[in-house]
Image (tube, grey):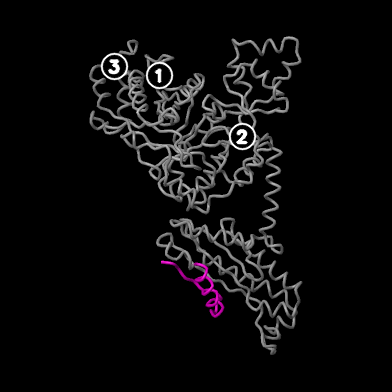
């Protein structure tokens, strides 16, 4: 490339010594590869302590752009040695200071892509806020430039810098990569889960794909999947590799997790609601779009995809009606010279989710945006179909019926079926600690016999109200049936004394339950009723016993089939304890 011959022979030799590693980015729902990120290696061999030092050096010598172009050629060439590279994307990291170099010019990337027969839509430029606080940052300029050139752009390390949300507002990148800082041990940290969920759902509403970066454990992976992230990258999937044939099309370990994890929810019932609307391609002319609406008169809203069949937004027929009914409107729309910019301006952002996403995520995304017209559904990151607003409402109604079926009719708490499902998740999650607690009302049968079913129901409702009001939302709360309740929590790193919280439940119920008795029985401290052998007996006032089991994150698998049995034995022991609570732990 003659016009970029500013590199010295010494720097050309250094580039020859550098090598490129690739790390896969996979679909979080299927384990299928989506992209690879190119990572520079062998910087020590050319005398630099870090990759950042290499780029700082070429920037100071004012040859950053020339260096970067030669590096692109090296990366693109090696990328083509990956099996089926044509079906995946290449994430290439950019230095934000490119525009501050005197050699910068346009059109060079496409020239190099053509040299190696790589399609434009296969390339995604990755930028970060590393230099954002310096006067020569230019991050927003780089993002805007490459978007105007119709390249995909990703923001790296999202959430750690200062301009991330501003960039979402001003430029809306195609991808954001959530920084490892927010994802490490996310399954144990409620604050991290809330923040990542907030970032992810905001991005999805704007039509942005989300990569969970730096994932190292199964539990981190599953938590990010539950939150709704589209893709995942990290050591849990594969470390960066210099050997390109080690990059796989499908990661079998991830596929096994999807097949065997009980947390992977059934999504079959949403498929019947998906409309298979033929999409419009972003490079279709307005004349072709007009012909489309004449052919499909029933389609008022149409998904728009790129050449790789990936969704980029929605096209509304109403947006062009003012042209259709004006004397020169159709002629204006059919003007091919301005077609690209005009079509792009008509496309509206739309949330997109994978066909394997759970129903709760779909409902939450739709409910958080009152103006949403629907959600685009993808399969392996390709357009699959469209869920209209009306169809999502139908799903919500169906889900409410299912929820009502699984609720205890008296307390409205999740019933026995949901409790069993939760315990299955506990048994499956090998690297997560839990605190499980069974509550059983003491002397309830005697109370029910003397005071009747109406007051018996009030006693059960009273206990349900107490656990709802006094245990935070991080607790799972269920009503197994009758006078048996179940609560559970994943302990966080804070110094929360969960045992004290559970003991307080016992005390509150015992104090409040006294109000259900007559003054005489309350003062006496017991009631007279018949036992199972029909003999009169004194029964103490209502109380509650708690069986508490601490399930450690390690060595749990050997107890998987015994958790229910252990809790049942603890419940019997709790009734004999003075404080009505029995504690145990799986070591």
Numbered range of the magenta stretch: 563-587
Instruction: Tell me, yes or no, whether the two marked residues, 1 and 3, touch with CB atoms within 8 Å.
Output: no
State the residue in front, 302 or 176. Answer: 302
Asked if residue 296 lies in the magenta stretch, the reply is no
Image coords of residue 189 (percent x, y): 49, 51
Query: How would you rate the neighbour count of disc 1 (Cα within 10 Å): few for under 14, some for 14-19, many for 20 or more?
Result: some
Which residue is tagged 1?
A: 100
Q: In the rendered structure, which disc, 2 or 3, sits on the residue that comes first in sequence?
A: 3
Q: Which residue matches tag 3?
A: 7
Q: Quadrant of residue 331?
A: top right
* Mark closer to the observer (2, 3): 2
Q: Secondary structure at mark 1?
A: helix
Under circle 3, the secondary element is loop
Pair 1/3: label in front: 3
The quadrant in which the N terminus is found is top left
Reply yes or no: does residue 566 show up in magenta.
yes
């Amino acid at each position: 490339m003659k016009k970029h011959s500013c590199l010295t022979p010494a720097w050309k030799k250094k580039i020859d010594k550098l090598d490129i590693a690739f790390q896969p980015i996979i679909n979080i729902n299927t384990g299928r590869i989506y992209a690879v990120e190119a990572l520079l290696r062998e910087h020590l061999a050319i005398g630099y302590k870090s990759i950042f030092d290499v780029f700082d050096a070429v920037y100071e010598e004012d040859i950053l752009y020339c260096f970067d172009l030669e590096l692109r050629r090296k990366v693109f060439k090696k990328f083509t040695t990956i099996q089926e590279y044509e079906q995946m994307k290449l994430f290439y990291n950019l230095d934000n200071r490119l525009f501050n170099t005197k050699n910068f010019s346009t059109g060079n990337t496409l020239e190099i892509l053509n040299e190696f027969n790589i399609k434009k839509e296969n390339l995604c430029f990755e930028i970060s806020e590393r230099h954002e606080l310096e006067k020569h940052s230019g991050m927003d300029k780089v993002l805007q430039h490459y978007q105007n050139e119709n390249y995909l752009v990703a923001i790296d390390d999202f959430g750690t810098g200062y301009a991330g949300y501003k960039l979402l507002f001003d430029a809306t990148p195609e991808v954001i990569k959530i920084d490892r800082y927010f994802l490490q041990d996310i399954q144990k940290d409620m604050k991290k889960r809330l923040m990542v969920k907030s970032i992810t759902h905001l991005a999805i509403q704007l039509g942005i794909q989300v990569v969970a970066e730096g994932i190292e454990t199964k539990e981190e992976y599953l938590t990010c999947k539950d939150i709704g992230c589209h893709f995942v990258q990290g050591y849990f999937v594969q470390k960066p590799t210099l050997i390109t044939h080690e990059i796989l099309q499908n990661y079998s370990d991830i596929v096994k997790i999807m097949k065997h994890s009980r947390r992977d929810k059934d999504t079959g019932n949403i498929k019947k609601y998906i409309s298979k609307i033929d999409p419009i391609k972003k490079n279709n002319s307005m004349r072709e779009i007009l012909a489309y609406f004449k052919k499909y008169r029933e389609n008022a809203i149409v998904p728009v995809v790129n050449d790789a069949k990936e969704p980029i937004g929605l096209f509304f027929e109403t947006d062009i009606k003012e042209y259709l009914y004006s004397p020169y409107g159709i002629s204006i729309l059919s003007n091919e010279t301005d077609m690209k910019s005009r079509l792009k301006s008509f496309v509206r952002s739309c949330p997109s989710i994978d066909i394997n996403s759970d129903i709760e995520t779909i409902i939450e995304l739709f409910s958080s945006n009152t103006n949403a017209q629907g959600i685009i559904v993808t399969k392996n990151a390709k357009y699959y179909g469209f869920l209209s607003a009306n169809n999502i409402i139908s799903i919500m109604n169906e889900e409410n019926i299912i929820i009502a079926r699984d609720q205890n009719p008296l307390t409205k708490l999740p019933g026995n079926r949901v409790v069993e499902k939760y315990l299955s998740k506990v048994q499956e999650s090998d690297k997560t600690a839990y605190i499980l607690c069974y509550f059983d009302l003491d002397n309830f049968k005697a109370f029910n016999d003397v005071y009747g079913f109406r007051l018996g129901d009030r006693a059960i409702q009273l206990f349900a109200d107490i656990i709802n009001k006094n245990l935070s939302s991080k607790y799972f709360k269920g009503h197994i049936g009758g006078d048996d309740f179940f609560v559970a929590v994943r302990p966080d790193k804070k110094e929360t004394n969960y045992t004290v919280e559970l003991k307080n439940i016992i005390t509150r119920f015992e104090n409040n339950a006294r109000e259900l008795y007559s003054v005489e029985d309350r003062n006496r401290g017991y009631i007279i009723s018949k036992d199972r052998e029909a003999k009169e007996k004194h029964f103490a006032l209502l109380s509650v016993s708690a069986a508490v089991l601490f399930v450690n994150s390690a060595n749990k698998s050997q107890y998987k089939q015994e958790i229910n049995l252990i809790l049942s034995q603890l419940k019997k022991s709790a009734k004999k304890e003075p404080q009505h609570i029995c504690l145990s732990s799986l070591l």
